[in-house]
Amino acid sequence: MCRVLGIIGNDDIVGILALGLYAQIYAGDHSAGIAAVTDGGILVEKALGKAIDVFPGHPDMQSKVAIGHNGCTTSELQPNRSRLSFYRLTMV
C-alpha cells in the first residue's frame, strides 16, 4: 500500500513533510517523492529507494504547499525491473 502525505503551512514545510515520510517508511518501500508548489510552478523530486535514502537531509525545495509519497512493491514488479510510479497533480 502506498502512503501519501500533504501539508499546507505558513512556513517552509518541505523538511517537515520529509520527516513525515520518514515516519511512514515500510520495509517494502521502493520509491519516494515530494511535489512542492513554488513561484515557478510545481517542483517534483522522486527516486527509487526509501524516503530516508531519497531525501537524506532537508530537500532542496522551499514551499508552503507540498505533497509526499512513499510507494511499496507489488507482485507486479519483477526482479531486475524497477518501476517508479508517481501520482498526477492537478492545480485548479
Image (cartoon, rainbow, N blue to C red):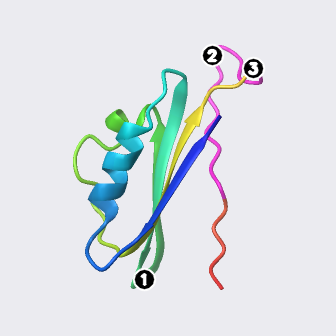
Q: Residue furthest left?
A: 57
Q: Residues within 10 Å of mark 3 (few under 14, many from 20)?
A: few
Residue at 34% x, 34% y is 53
Q: Nearer the viewer, mark 3 or mark 1?
A: 3
**Residue nearer the viewer, 48 or 68:** 68
Asked whether the beta carbons under mark 3 and mark 1 sit within 8 Å of each other, the answer is no
Kindly report the distance in space between the C-alpha atoms of the residues bearing marks 3 and 2: 13 Å
Which residue is labeled 2 in the image? Answer: 80
- Amino acid type at image mark 1: Gly
Instruction: Identify the disc placed on residue 75.
Output: 3
SS at mark 2 in the image: loop
Kindly report the distance in space between the C-alpha atoms of the residues bearing marks 2 and 1: 37 Å
Question: Does the magenta run of residues contain 23?
Answer: no
Quadrant position of residue 45: bottom left
Quadrant housing the N terminus: top right
Q: Position of residue 46 (x, y in %)?
A: 48, 48
Kindly report the distance in space between the C-alpha atoms of the residues bearing marks 3 and 1: 38 Å
The first of marks 2 and 1 along the sequence is: 1
Q: Magenta stretch mostly in which secondary structure?
A: loop
Instruction: Identify the disc placed on residue 88.
Output: none
In the shown orientation, is residue 18 left or right of residue 48?
left
Residue at 29% x, 71% y is 62
Which residue is labeled 1 in the image? Answer: 40
Q: Position of residue 15 (x, y in %)?
A: 27, 57
SS at mark 3 in the image: loop
- Amino acid type at image mark 3: Ser
> Magenta segment range?
75-87
In the shown orientation, is residue 39 left or right of residue 15?
right
In the shown orientation, is residue 32 left or right of residue 92?
left
The first of marks 3 and 2 along the sequence is: 3
Residue at 65% x, 23% y is 81
**Residue nearer the viewer, 23 or 74:** 23
